[in-house]
Image (cartoon, rainbow, N blue to C red):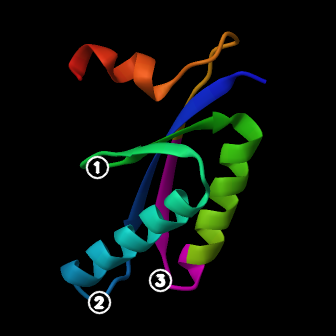
Amino acid sequence: MAKVTCSIRFLPLLAKDASHSYKLVDTAIEVIRESGLKYLVGPSETTVEGEFDEILELVRRLAGEMENHVERFILDVSFDYARSGVSIDEKTALYR
């Protein structure tokens, strides 16, 4: 199966304060890092590259882990899917 990219934005809604929100975002990024998939952290979202099913599993794992840390959150997920595949490198090469 061809690689896809997925931008993931985690927004905690019921965190104690802003500094706690940043710690929760750091925890979400750590779950992504532990997946072993290629990823790129941006200022508002993290983009992950992998097979579609791998990323779906990561999203499930991420939601389950964040349930342990915050009562309510938004997990905004956006896929870029092409039959021939798509990569973080090809999408950012012009800007690097």
- Crowd rating for badge 2 (residues with CA inside 10 Å; few <14, some 14–19, many 20+): few
Query: Residue 60: where, in percent of width, then height?
Result: 69, 60
Residue extending farthest to the bottom is 16
- Residue at 58% x, 46% y is 37
User: For residue 47, which quarter of the picture?
Assistant: top left
Q: Which residue is mark 2?
A: 16
| Residues drawn in magenta | 66-77
Query: Residue 1: where, in percent of width, then height?
Result: 79, 24
Q: Which residue is mark 3?
A: 70
Q: Could you tell me which secondary element the residue under label 3 belongs to?
A: loop
Q: Which residue is mark 1?
A: 44
Query: Residue 73: where, in percent of width, then height?
Result: 46, 70
Marks 1 and 3, the one that precedes in the sequence:
1
- Crowd rating for badge 1 (residues with CA inside 10 Å; few <14, some 14–19, many 20+): few
Query: Left or right of 79: which side holds 53?
Result: right
Q: Amino acid at mark 2?
A: Lys
Asked whether 38 falls inside the magenta stretch, the response is: no
**Mark 1 in CB contact with mark 2 (< 8 angstroms):** no
User: For residue 35, which quarter of the picture?
Assistant: bottom right
- Residue at 50% x, 59% y is 33
- Could you tell me how many numbered marks the image carries? 3
Marks 3 and 2, the one that precedes in the sequence:
2
Query: Left or right of 14: which side holds 48?
Result: right
Please state which of the two labelled residues, at mark 1 or mark 3, is closer to the viewer.
1
Q: Amino acid at mark 3?
A: Val
